[in-house]
Amino acid sequence: MFSRSMFQPRSGMSFGMAAALLSAVTGVYAQGAAQPQVLKALEAQGLTVVEEFDVGSELRAFAGVAGDQPIAVYVTSDGSAVVGTRLDASGAPVDVATLQELVAKPMSEKTWAALENATWVLDGDAEAPRVVYTFSDANCPFCHRFWEAARPWVDSGKVQLRHLFVGVIKADSPAKAAAILEADDPSAALLENEKNFARGGIKPASSISSRAQRILDENQQLMQTTGFRGTPGIVVRESDGLIRKFNGMPRPEQMAEVMGPR
């Protein structure tokens, strides 16, 4: 039994971006057999096929990604395909764990590694057990609201925020980000900006160094690749290794999902 669905890209991550995230972790997906023609047609429409997996002799199953979502493609004996979720006799979805293992976990690992290796500014205790990445603009009021809402977790040492600065909100956003990034103590400069946010925040840098501009460009590209089009864009990793993303300021009832228990 199948739940049929057309694959549609979700806003944020393009098919090419998803393929780039998977490029270092995927192998040859066809297990010794010729690639079904229907897969070529789906790939031409933007589906990225990752790997074939076994579901018995009546179907060939392929794990893929559409947008930033794992998805399965089941090819029948006549060469046609069903794209969506396979259900068992009781109506429960199957192959979810397989898709997580073949697609979701590798994508999460690649994304998390890219965030770790980016240039970010620490907010909180570097030894805090829970890490939360946030794409931030020094002029973003919702970023400031998130910073305020996060204080109980950060101040108690339970969470460290890692701010990846971009310059997208106002004309002086890049210069304010540069003032933070180029400060002797970027964490203190971040704190200055947030504590004085209502009065305009940190004084913009008089010029933007090539280093600061490179960081801003790289962070903006990473923000788009990760699936965000605005700030804050928040990423956490759960105990199962999968990442969760929150677009914009979380609702009050979501803060525990982002930050963990208080």
Image (cartoon, grey):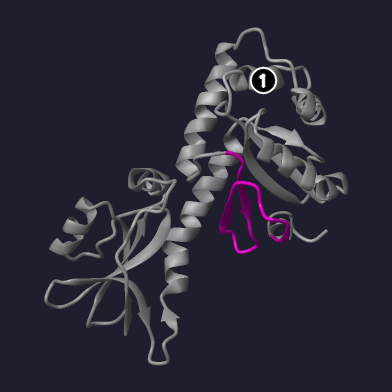
| Quarter of the rendering containing residue 74 | bottom left
Would residue 171 be counted in the magenta stretch?
no
Q: Is residue 3 left or right of residue 116?
A: left
Residue 113 in percent (x, y) is at 56, 43
The residue at the point 32 percent across, 80 percent down is 2
Q: Is residue 109 left or right of residue 86?
A: right
Residue 100 in percent (x, y) is at 47, 65
The residue at the point 76 percent across, 44 percent down is 160
Camera-nearest residue between 80 and 110:
80
Vertical side of 150 occupied by 176: above or below: above
Residue 253 in percent (x, y) is at 72, 61
Residue 147 in percent (x, y) is at 75, 41
User: For the residue labelled by badge 1, is the local secondary structure a helix, a strand or a loop?
Assistant: helix
Residue 187 appears in the rendering: no
The residue at the point 45 percent across, 73 percent down is 96
Considering every residue shown, the one lying at the far front of the view is: 198
Q: Amino acid at mark 1?
A: Lys
Q: Residues within 10 Å of mark 1 (few under 14, many from 20)?
A: many
Considering every residue shown, the one lying at the far top of the view is: 206
- Which residue is tagged 1? 176
Camera-nearest residue between 190 and 18:
190
The residue at the point 41 percent across, 75 percent down is 95
| Quarter of the rendering containing residue 37 | bottom left
Would residue 239 be counted in the magenta stretch?
yes
The image quadrant where one finds the N terminus is bottom left
Q: Is residue 44 left or right of residue 182?
A: left
**Range of magenta residues:** 231-253
The image quadrant where one finds the C terminus is bottom right
